[in-house]
Image: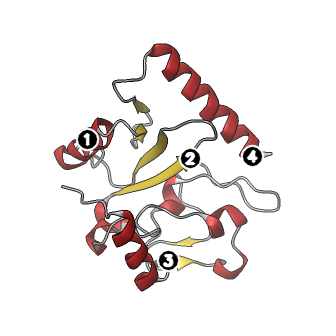
Amino acid sequence: MLELLSDEERSQSVAQTNQRECGRCTACCFTHSVAEKGVEVTKMYDWCAHCKQGVGCAIYTERPESCAIYRCMWRSGYFGDDSKRPDRWGIILDTWALEEERETLINVWECTPGRYRSPEIQAILEALIATGTCVIVGRPLSREQDLRFPVHMDESDQHRYVRAAVNAMHAAQE
């Protein structure tokens, strides 16, 4: 089972890891899209042309801003265990706080085929949803998006939340 660190443990972990470095992990170079001016467009679930798989970014010092500022939950120190590094675990988790929403959006990106539907990952997602504090957006390789909402959110709350997420995404791209 995934053990999320407490805020105090996470602070200590982040201080000790100094915001972990990606190292040889290139999972987000596959799962995430990059569409910045002056940069070759990369689509979700396509390897970035600058990625040296399992080695790192060939243009690391000049990489796009979206790449430079991106932090998955492992790199941000949420997990104390290096086995949860995305390239080893087969899943990337990242968070997105939406203004005026109390629930945090957690994206779950599958980077190893079949990993998203594994019993371990499904148990983790159920436990996260049970906290009532997050909305899960599952992004399996099949591209069949999986939305999960806490039980306290009725259908109108769910629609409002999705609209807020879409609006925030469009605002971030401008």
Q: Position of residue 36 (x, y in %)?
A: 76, 56
How far is the residue under mark 1 from the one under mark 4?
A: 30 Å
Point 74% across, 46% down: residue: 173
Point 31% across, 43% down: residue: 128
Residue placed under numbered mark 4 in the picture = 173
Q: Position of residue 8 (x, y in %)?
A: 37, 70
Between disc 3 and disc 1, the foreground one is: 3
Q: Position of residue 110 (x, y in %)?
A: 38, 49
Instruction: Say which label, 3 or 1, has the lower sequence index.
Output: 3
Whether residue 45 is visible: no
Q: Verify CB contact (< 8 Å) between mark 3 and mark 2.
A: no
The residue closer to the viewer here, 18 or 100, is 100
Residue placed under numbered mark 1 in the picture = 117
Q: Say which element carries label 4.
A: helix
- Which label is found at residue 97? 2
Residue type beneath disc 4: Gln
